[in-house]
Image: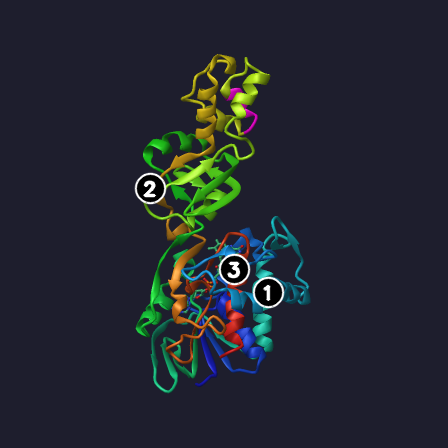
Amino acid sequence: MTYDSIVIGGGAAGLFCALAAGGRGRRVLVLERNREVGAKIAISGGGRCNFTNLHTTPDRFLSANPDFARSALARYTPANFIDLVERHRIPYYEKTEGQLFCEGAGAARAIVRMLLDECAAGGVEIRTGCTVGSVSSGARFRIESDQGTFEAPTLVLASGGLSIPKLGATDFAYRIARQFQLPVVEPRPGLVPLIVAPDDRAWMSALSGVSTPVRVETGGAIFREAALFTHRGLSGPAILQASSYWRDGAHITIDWIPDASDDVLVARKRARPKARIKTVLAEMVPTRLAAALSAAVPDRGLGDIKDETLHEIGRRLGSWRLTPVGTEGLPKAEVTVGGVDTAALSQRTMEARDVRGLFIIGEAVDVTGWLGGYNFQWAWASGWAAGMAV
Ligand SMILES: Cc1cc2nc3c(=O)[nH]c(=O)nc-3n(C[C@H](O)[C@H](O)[C@H](O)COP(=O)(O)OP(=O)(O)OC[C@H]3O[C@@H](n4cnc5c(N)ncnc54)[C@H](O)[C@@H]3O)c2cc1C
């Protein structure tokens, strides 16, 4: 059978590209290896799908070419997606910092339903449970699959990144990109919990479940959100964000008292010389964390400790250096950082510069958003850009 375009991958980007192209009257086929499309959308945002972020700007994305995403993001904006959500009468709310979520438990499925309805309106054909064997190109792209052979003049790779293999993630897009001589920026897990060295694990694992606001810095990026202690290290939004910028062997710097200066203990000494460091810290961080952080400091009244010692302790609490030994890896990563090198793609259409008719979109591309709805906005925007061009 022949089509105008074949999209491989029925996730966020693939479905969006298909509905955009279908809406233009193109004859589109989507091939998805899972039994159902949109597996990640359905479980995203704890079942509520954080489908966009009102503050979407190119600087909320990591890429070897930080400017690449600008064009697609400008052409399909959060406001455009909100219009679509409202047309489908899906209730939503702003949780925090511009993050828009669907209202109600399991409501993420409404987004999948919406994408399927839009695809149906555009006459898009979707084949699920379809395993693609090989892709070749001549005058047209030829796709061999366990459901037959399909041909089209344009092919869209929308098979995502490597995170959460149990939801269907494969290296398919990277393999096909390499087959067509397109470079791939080494993929690695992003938005993923960090594992700390045994020394740190000893005191941190006892705090497992404790959450505290922090300021985390690594790889030139700074995030001020909550950190969460786990059995093996640290998680929580601040750490997940930082993990995307963290590189093997690098350290992260944590400010445990982000609302206080290095001189906070000196100031408290003047006001309450009898108070102990542990007591004062417990007014700023959870009690169990205060006890752990003050385990190695003098257990005396502040009045009995020199100003310079208190200043030094304050400084250490504000810039606590930690060298993670790794991450929880792709099975726990919300996204894959890296992917098909943007240098090989048109930023306006997502078409490969040197392979006419081959488009690559979504997480498969070396564009990775922060936590907070940015990754879906990239999937919609890059899908739209390709959908307008195929
Ligand atoms: C637990 C979790 C929660 C998340 N929550 C959010 C959130 O709330 N907000 C947000 O912005 N982002 C969130 N993300 C990230 C977001 O889900 C992804 O960035 C986004 O889904 C990427 O879209 P995509 O279409 O490129 O890839 P995917 O959605 O991963 O879709 C790729 C599709 O291709 C299929 N596929 C793979 N290989 C093949 C093959 N060889 N043949 C056929 N099909 C194939 C896969 O089965 C999959 O259906 C979350 C991710 C996870 C894992």
Q: How far apart are the alpha carbons under marks 1 and 3? A: 12 Å
How far is the residue under mark 1 from the one under mark 2?
Answer: 38 Å
> In the rendered image, which residue does mark 3 sit on?
58
- Which circle's residue, 1 or 3, is located before the other in the chain? 3
The image position of residue 199, as x and y in percent, is 33, 31
Say whether residue 272 is magenta.
no
Q: Tell me which residue sits at (61%, 54%) in the image.
A: 101
- Asked if disc 3 is less than 8 Å from ligand 1, the answer is no
Q: Do the residues labelled 1 and 3 touch (CB within 8 Å)?
A: no
Residue 103 falls left or right of residue 241:
right
The quadrant of the picture occupied by the N terminus is: bottom left
Q: How far apart are marks 3 and 2 (CA)?
A: 30 Å
Q: In which quarter of the image is residue 176?
A: bottom left
Foreground mark, 1 or 2? 1
Say which quarter of the image contains residue 144: bottom left
Q: Residue 325 carries which label?
A: 2
Q: Earlier in the sequence, mark 3 or mark 2?
A: 3
**Front label number (3 vs 2):** 3
Which amino acid does the dot numbered 1 rest on? Answer: Thr
Q: Give the range drawn in magenta.
A: 278-284
Residues packed near mark 1 inside 10 Å, few (<14), some (14 to 19) or many (20 plus):
some
- Residue for point 59% across, 72% down: 118
277 over 383 or under it: above or below: above
Name the spot of residue 250 as percent of width and height, x first.
Answer: 35, 44
With respect to residue 361, does 230 lie above or below? above
Q: Tag on residue 77?
A: 1
Question: Is the residue 14 above or below the residue 138 in the image?
Answer: above
Q: Which residue, as the protein is rendered here, is positioned at the far bottom?
A: 139
Q: Name the N-terminal-most of marks 1 and 2.
A: 1
Drawn side of residue 347 relative to residue 96, left or right: left
Q: Tag 1's secondary structure?
A: loop
Q: Residue furthest front?
A: 308
